[in-house]
């Protein structure tokens, strides 16, 4: 039976202790979606081995995830406006768990398309969770500490980025490596048995994850949470056409599209990149992938600190320029320096998403809500741009050249933060500020 508290937001914000357990539950969502996202760098080399895929084909792992966000962004928002955020979280957890359990039949059938389908279902659930979690954290306690609570909850997303590659690498990746020639020379029965064994390594981790998500869903159903359905009080209804008359919003959508594409390219192909450019093993590469996740988390804290002294657009411009330079090192360097360059990129790109987001919705007035949705939908860049990386890698035979895609992406972010970030309430082309 649903238990949704009918208290007002003022009452909610004044009862921090009362909502400590609900806050813990909502914070766990940040960890779990961060964990599942950061298993993708493990899945890409694993599925590449199991299905003998090229880099373009492995990029469909990210495509399946981020296209789901694009498809579900508006339906998730509509569902929660009608049925409330708590019901949206429970539905999201249900989809998350279902997608996790689907990895078992996917492994049994050994069909790559089934793995992609399972990832799509998981990501549909995550679209609901990410839509609901942020507003819930802000109301589960005193209003004056809302920002601190949100930053605290988001830090668990960074913790997951560090732990997922290490844990996933231990239980999913195997030390065995086989060339295409070795596989071709194997007897059919032996090759089939080997690939079945490799594919089955995902069953245990994803089954455990699915069970944990079910437990979290049950706890949400049994816990009283405030109903934070929002009332529409705007006198001038916003439309997509009206929102897009803000030039800085249009550019923020473009910048976010390219930024998310860059993030996915850098982190999802990290293990594959490290093994090729530095010649290290997959198991060793998972540790460096964990360090990249840690750098991402630390970069977000550092960026928040530096913004006390540097304007957000200027910090974004500087970080974009540094990321461009590190991308060049990753493309044209050799050995471990290229791996360290990617870890450096993880640090400097960590503040880009929230900074682009906040600059993009600044000064939108009645168009803020719709503008926010449009920027969130632009994360579909994470579905398409990795395909470009995979294509270039296959075409050239060198995955390092594929990182021309992140270089292009960081260039777009740099241009945005240099010239097109400034809100223009008169809806004229923003003046160039040098």
Image (cartoon, helix red, strand yellow):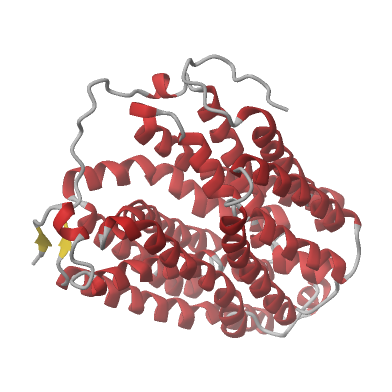
Residue 288 in view (yes/no): yes
Quarter holding the N terminus is bottom left
Could you say which quadrant of the image residue 16 lies in? bottom left
Q: Position of residue 90 (x, y in %)?
A: 25, 62
Quarter holding the C terminus is top right
Question: Looking at this view, is 67 or 155 the one in front?
Answer: 155
Q: Residue drawn at (71%, 74%), measured in percent from left and top? A: 288
Q: Position of residue 401 (x, y in %)?
A: 83, 51
Vertical side of 428 occupied by 147: above or below: below
Q: Residue drawn at (48%, 62%), measured in percent from left and top? A: 114
Question: Looking at this view, is 410 or 15 the one in front?
Answer: 15
Residue 133 in view (yes/no): no
Question: Looking at this view, is 366 or 271 the one in front?
Answer: 366
Q: Is residue 220 left or right of residue 327?
A: left
Vertical side of 388 occupied by 211: above or below: below
Q: Position of residue 256 (x, y in %)?
A: 57, 41
Could you say which quadrant of the image residue 299 lies in? bottom right
Question: Looking at this view, is 363 or 336 the one in front?
Answer: 363
Number of marks drawn: 0
Q: Position of residue 289 (x, y in %)?
A: 67, 71
Q: Is residue 79 left or right of residue 419?
A: left
Q: Residue drawn at (77%, 64%), measured in percent from left and top? A: 273
Q: Residue drawn at (81%, 74%), measured in percent from left and top? A: 179
């Amino acid at each position: 039976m649903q238990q949704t508290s009918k208290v007002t937001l003022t009452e909610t914000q004044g009862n921090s202790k009362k909502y400590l357990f609900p806050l813990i539950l909502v914070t766990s969502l940040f960890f779990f979606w961060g964990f599942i996202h950061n298993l993708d760098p493990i899945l890409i080399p694993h599925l590449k081995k199991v299905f003998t895929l090229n880099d373009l084909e492995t990029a469909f792992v990210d495509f399946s995830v981020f296209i789901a966000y694009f498809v579900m962004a508006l339906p998730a928002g509509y569902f929660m406006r009608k049925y409330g955020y708590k019901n949206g979280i429970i539905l999201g957890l249900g989809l998350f768990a279902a997608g996790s359990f689907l990895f078992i039949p996917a492994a049994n059938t050994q069909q790559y398309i089934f793995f992609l389908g399972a990832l799509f279902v998981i990501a549909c659930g995550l679209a609901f969770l990410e839509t609901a979690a942020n507003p819930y954290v802000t109301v589960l306690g005193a209003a004056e500490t809302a920002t601190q609570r949100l930053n605290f909850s988001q830090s668990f997303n960074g913790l997951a980025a560090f732990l997922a590659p290490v844990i996933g690498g231990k239980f999913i990746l195997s030390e065995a490596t086989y060339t295409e020639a070795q596989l071709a020379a194997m007897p059919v029965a032996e090759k089939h048995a080997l690939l079945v064994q490799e594919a089955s390594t995902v069953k245990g981790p994803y089954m455990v994850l699915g069970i944990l998500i079910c437990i979290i869903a049950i706890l949400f159903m049994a816990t009283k949470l405030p109903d934070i359905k929002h009332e529409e009080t705007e006198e001038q209804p916003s439309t997509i056409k009206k929102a897009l008359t803000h030039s800085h919003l249009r550019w923020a959508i473009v910048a976010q599209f390219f930024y998310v594409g860059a993030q996915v390219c850098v982190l999802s192909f990290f293990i594959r990149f490290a093994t090729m450019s530095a010649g290290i093993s997959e198991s060793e590469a998972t540790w460096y992938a964990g360090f990249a996740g840690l750098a991402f988390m630390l970069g977000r804290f550092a960026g928040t600190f530096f913004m006390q002294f540097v304007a957000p657009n200027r910090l974004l411009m500087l970080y974009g320029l540094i990321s461009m330079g590190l991308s060049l090192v990753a493309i044209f360097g050799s050995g471990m320096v290229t791996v360290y360059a990617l870890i450096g990129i993880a640090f400097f790109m960590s503040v880009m998403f929230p900074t682009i987001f906040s600059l993009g919705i600044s000064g939108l007035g009645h168009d803020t809500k719709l503008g926010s949705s449009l920027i969130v939908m632009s994360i579909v860049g994470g579905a398409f741009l990795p395909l470009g990386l995979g294509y270039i890698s296959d075409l050239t035979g060198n995955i390092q050249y594929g990182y021309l895609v992140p270089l292009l992406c960081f260039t777009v972010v740099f241009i945005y933060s240099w010239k097109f970030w400034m809100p223009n309430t008169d809806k004229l082309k923003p003046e160039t500020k040098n």
